Image (cartoon, rainbow, N blue to C red):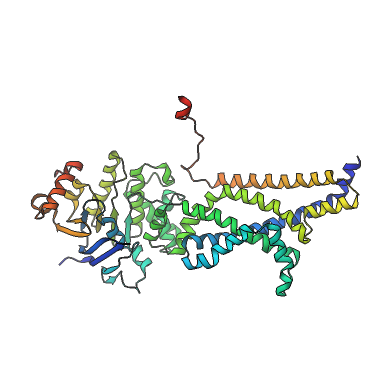
Amino acid sequence: MEQINIIWQGLPSLLSGTVTTIILTIYFLGLGFVMGIILALGRVYGSRIINYIIIRPFERFFRAVPALVLLFLFYFGSSFFNLNFSPFVAAILAMGLRSAAYQSEIFRGAIQSIGDGQMKAARSIGMNMFQSIRYIILPQALRLSIPPWANEYAVVLKDTSLAYAVGVTELLRQGRYIVARTFGNALLVYTFCALIYFILVFIGNQILKKLEKKYKIPGHEIQAPKQQSVLERI
Amino acid sequence: MPNVILRAENIYKKYGNLEVLKGISFRVNQGETTVIIGPSGTGKSTLLTCINQLTPPDKGHIWLEDTEITHPDTDINLIRSSIGMVFQHFNLFTHLSVLDNVRIGLLVVKKIPMSEATKISMEKLNDVGLGDKVNAYPAELSGGQQQRVSIARALAMKPKLILFDEPTSALDPELIGEVLNVMTKLAESGMTMVVVSHEMGFARAVANDIIFMENGVIVEEGKPDKMFIQSENPRTKEFLHKITELYGGKKE
């Protein structure tokens, strides 16, 4: 009974932490999405110089440096440049740009998997580069990106908990407060936090699955192999 | 004097060290069909994509009526919207329905209002015999149907000329006929066409002019009867003989 009471009393702060976690996720993924598409288009269609001077180093850096180090760099490092980011802003920049580096890879792969015949056909009816990308390439690439993007969604959502380290009051920090206030109960409270993360990932993935189904191209359904493989028949 | 629609002069194109086109010149009159034949790897397809600048030539000039396509100040997107292109592998936009495939150029490039664009597209789809497939998606169609959609897509833009890059080479033998029929009808209706093809029957029946290309140069050019019956060049003779045996080309 006592345990239920602890959770019940902590529920408002846990829920407000959950809201912060969701907002962080939206910002991280949103920044990552916009930047990721720009980077991917640069990778595929941009000049070699831009690729080697800006895009690749950017991607390498944000994929190679641990998330926690990025957070510290943006938060504690910002004062060095007299920027003094708040924990929230520092977290969005660090984790958003990091997600951009990963999402760029997702979109690049999707764009490159679309045959160059699509671009040729688009250009041949008089579309300029922008129109071809906007109306022909991206609609196809984004459809293909949904499954790997669902993965990125789960990773980014869970990594919001790292923002704890620079002082953002998200779900995990709220949980930590309750543990500190009630002297113990760590297992109970953190399990409850884990449950909330689980539910958020689950709901998000369901939504993305629906999206994938809704936008699948007729005639392109992936069918489960019904026939035995040759090897099995032997 | 017939009206010259397309004029190419001394087209050169290199891929790395490989010289694909070595000084090609030809012209196409309004309402006429020119069929380009020749062994694979002789630059026939490259020549077509040089015309609409999908692969810009290294040297040489191309005019569409009075506009020089190869001039750096020419708005190439505007030119391309008036030169249709039909690809060997159809290249239909896979995420769009048949109707949208035909309509999208009108909406996006020509900025024609939706109702008008739909009307034109439906008309063209009916012309190629696919009025009942407008809501299907490319992957749900046969190759022949897909190629006919791509012809409708080119037609909808009201092109001055259509380039066909081996339009039947990727099709099952059974489906070639339906595409050739559409092309024949088009030629008869007065559309100007440049066709790279091995369909000798089609070339013989429809072409006003046949160009035989080999190793990046035009070996011989002439009316179908002259080319098939009394070609001057021994290489042309040999090639036509072989290809006629393979694809058939007896005059109907």
Q: Residue at x 77, y 56 (%)?
A: A170
Q: Residue at x 15, y 58 (%)?
A: B221
Tell me which corner region of the image, top left, top right, bottom left or bottom right, holds residue B28. Answer: bottom left
**Along the line of sight, the residue nearer the viewer: A212 or A32:** A32
**Along the line of sight, the residue nearer the viewer: A182 or A141:** A182
The outermost residue toward the top is A234
Q: For the C terminus of chain B, which image quadrant?
A: top left
Q: Is residue B32 left or right of residue B101?
A: left
**Along the line of sight, the residue nearer the viewer: A168 or A132:** A168
Q: Is residue B181 left or right of residue B55?
A: left
Q: Is residue B137 above or below residue B160?
A: above
Number of numbered callouts drawn: 0
**Along the line of sight, the residue nearer the viewer: A58 or B43:** A58
Could you tell me if residue B159 is visible in this image? no
Q: Is residue A37 left or right of residue A153?
A: left
Residue B216 percent coordinates (x, y): 23, 59
Residue A76 percent coordinates (x, y): 74, 67
Q: Residue at x 41, y 53 (%)?
A: B101
Q: For the N terminus of chain B, which image quadrant?
A: bottom left
Q: Is residue B188 left or right of residue A33?
A: left
Q: Is residue A87 above or below residue B149?
A: below
Could you tell me if residue A233 is visible in this image? yes
Residue A27 percent coordinates (x, y): 67, 59
Residue A28 percent coordinates (x, y): 66, 58
